[in-house]
Amino acid sequence: MAKSDVTNYFRRTSLPWMICITLSMGFFTCTVYAPEVIPYDKLGPFGTFTRYLVDNHPDILYKGWWAASGIHVFEALYSQKVCSNKGIHGLNARLLWFGQTLLFGFASLGLLLKFDPKRPKHH
Protein backbone atom coordinates (compact mmCIF):
# COMPACT_ATOMS: atom_id res chain seq x y z
CA MET A 1 0.00 0.00 0.00
CA ALA A 2 1.41 3.39 -0.95
CA LYS A 3 2.22 5.80 1.87
CA SER A 4 -0.46 8.30 0.76
CA ASP A 5 -3.04 5.48 0.86
CA VAL A 6 -2.15 4.82 4.49
CA THR A 7 -2.13 8.52 5.39
CA ASN A 8 -5.68 8.97 4.08
CA TYR A 9 -7.09 5.51 4.86
CA PHE A 10 -10.74 5.41 5.85
CA ARG A 11 -13.36 2.70 5.63
CA ARG A 12 -17.06 3.25 6.28
CA THR A 13 -18.88 1.09 8.81
CA SER A 14 -21.38 -1.29 7.23
CA LEU A 15 -24.94 -0.05 6.81
CA PRO A 16 -26.51 -2.80 8.99
CA TRP A 17 -24.26 -1.75 11.91
CA MET A 18 -25.07 1.91 11.32
CA ILE A 19 -28.81 1.20 11.36
CA CYS A 20 -28.65 -1.10 14.39
CA ILE A 21 -26.57 1.27 16.53
CA THR A 22 -28.58 4.35 15.49
CA LEU A 23 -31.88 2.68 16.38
CA SER A 24 -30.52 1.22 19.62
CA MET A 25 -29.03 4.47 20.88
CA GLY A 26 -32.10 6.38 19.70
CA PHE A 27 -34.39 4.03 21.61
CA PHE A 28 -32.14 4.19 24.68
CA THR A 29 -32.20 7.99 24.50
CA CYS A 30 -35.99 7.95 24.37
CA THR A 31 -36.24 5.66 27.40
CA VAL A 32 -34.18 8.15 29.39
CA TYR A 33 -35.28 11.55 28.09
CA ALA A 34 -38.69 11.03 26.43
CA PRO A 35 -40.21 7.78 27.76
CA GLU A 36 -43.72 9.01 26.95
CA VAL A 37 -43.10 8.64 23.18
CA ILE A 38 -42.39 4.89 23.32
CA PRO A 39 -45.32 2.66 22.25
CA TYR A 40 -44.68 0.04 24.96
CA ASP A 41 -47.85 -1.95 24.20
CA LYS A 42 -46.76 -2.46 20.58
CA LEU A 43 -43.35 -3.89 21.48
CA GLY A 44 -44.53 -7.10 23.15
CA PRO A 45 -42.39 -8.51 25.97
CA PHE A 46 -39.60 -6.06 25.11
CA GLY A 47 -42.04 -3.17 25.64
CA THR A 48 -43.21 -4.63 28.94
CA PHE A 49 -39.62 -5.00 30.13
CA THR A 50 -38.71 -1.49 28.95
CA ARG A 51 -41.76 -0.02 30.70
CA TYR A 52 -40.75 -1.81 33.90
CA LEU A 53 -37.24 -0.31 33.70
CA VAL A 54 -38.58 3.18 32.93
CA ASP A 55 -41.06 3.03 35.83
CA ASN A 56 -38.90 1.30 38.42
CA HIS A 57 -35.26 1.94 37.54
CA PRO A 58 -34.91 5.27 35.73
CA ASP A 59 -31.65 5.94 37.58
CA ILE A 60 -30.06 2.81 36.10
CA LEU A 61 -31.24 3.80 32.62
CA TYR A 62 -29.87 7.31 33.09
CA LYS A 63 -26.49 6.08 34.31
CA GLY A 64 -26.40 3.43 31.58
CA TRP A 65 -27.08 6.03 28.89
CA TRP A 66 -24.26 8.24 30.17
CA ALA A 67 -21.94 5.22 30.39
CA ALA A 68 -22.71 4.19 26.79
CA SER A 69 -22.20 7.76 25.60
CA GLY A 70 -18.95 8.03 27.54
CA ILE A 71 -17.69 4.79 26.03
CA HIS A 72 -18.38 6.18 22.54
CA VAL A 73 -16.42 9.35 23.38
CA PHE A 74 -13.52 7.28 24.76
CA GLU A 75 -13.52 5.06 21.64
CA ALA A 76 -13.51 8.14 19.38
CA LEU A 77 -10.54 9.61 21.26
CA TYR A 78 -8.76 6.26 21.20
CA SER A 79 -9.30 6.04 17.43
CA GLN A 80 -6.99 9.03 17.11
CA LYS A 81 -4.17 7.20 18.89
CA VAL A 82 -4.75 4.17 16.67
CA CYS A 83 -4.65 6.43 13.58
CA SER A 84 -1.29 7.80 14.70
CA ASN A 85 0.08 4.34 15.42
CA LYS A 86 -0.97 3.08 11.97
CA GLY A 87 0.32 6.11 10.05
CA ILE A 88 -3.05 7.66 9.26
CA HIS A 89 -2.10 11.33 9.40
CA GLY A 90 -4.48 12.94 6.91
CA LEU A 91 -6.74 15.40 8.72
CA ASN A 92 -9.81 14.42 6.74
CA ALA A 93 -9.29 10.69 7.40
CA ARG A 94 -8.69 11.30 11.12
CA LEU A 95 -11.84 13.43 11.39
CA LEU A 96 -13.84 10.74 9.59
CA TRP A 97 -12.54 8.05 11.97
CA PHE A 98 -13.27 10.25 14.98
CA GLY A 99 -16.82 11.11 13.90
CA GLN A 100 -17.71 7.62 12.76
CA THR A 101 -16.35 6.06 15.94
CA LEU A 102 -18.15 8.63 18.09
CA LEU A 103 -21.45 7.69 16.41
CA PHE A 104 -20.99 3.94 15.91
CA GLY A 105 -18.43 2.91 18.53
CA PHE A 106 -16.93 -0.55 18.21
CA ALA A 107 -18.42 -1.07 14.74
CA SER A 108 -16.04 1.63 13.52
CA LEU A 109 -13.13 1.15 15.90
CA GLY A 110 -13.02 -2.56 15.04
CA LEU A 111 -12.41 -1.73 11.37
CA LEU A 112 -9.60 0.61 12.31
CA LEU A 113 -8.00 -1.91 14.66
CA LYS A 114 -8.12 -4.61 11.95
CA PHE A 115 -6.42 -2.35 9.41
CA ASP A 116 -2.84 -3.46 8.80
CA PRO A 117 -0.95 -0.82 6.80
CA LYS A 118 1.92 -3.27 6.17
CA ARG A 119 -0.29 -5.83 4.41
CA PRO A 120 -1.27 -5.19 0.78
CA LYS A 121 -4.96 -4.53 0.25
CA HIS A 122 -6.76 -6.95 -2.09
CA HIS A 123 -10.08 -6.13 -3.77
Image (cartoon, helix red, strand yellow):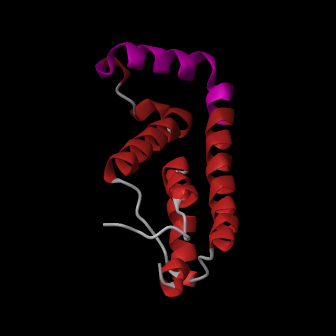
Q: Position of residue 66 (x, y in %)?
A: 66, 42
Q: Residue at x 54, y 85 (%)?
A: 3
Residue 44 vs 122, above or below: the answer is: above
| Residue drawn at the location 40% of the way across and 18% of the way down | 46
Seen from the viewer's position, the closer of residues 52 and 103 is 103
Q: Residue at x 52, y 15 (%)?
A: 52
Image spot of residue 61 (x, y percent): 61, 29
Q: Is residue 65 above or below residue 83?
A: above
Q: What main secondary structure does the magenta stretch of the protein show?
A: helix
Q: 56 and 99: which one is in front?
A: 99
The image quadrant where one finds the C terminus is bottom left
Residue 73 position by quadrant: bottom right
**Camera-side residue: 5 or 36?**
5
Point 41% across, 69% down: residue: 121
Is 24 on the left-hand or right-hand side of 83?
Answer: left
> Which residue is farthest bottom?
4
Q: Tell me where residue 114 appears, x and y as whole percent.
A: 53, 56
> In the image shown, does 87 or 15 lie closer to the viewer?
87
Q: Is residue 114 left or right of residue 73?
A: left
The reply to whether the magenta stretch includes residue 49 is yes
Magenta stretch, residue numbers: 42-62
In the rendered image, which quarter is residue 13 located in?
bottom left
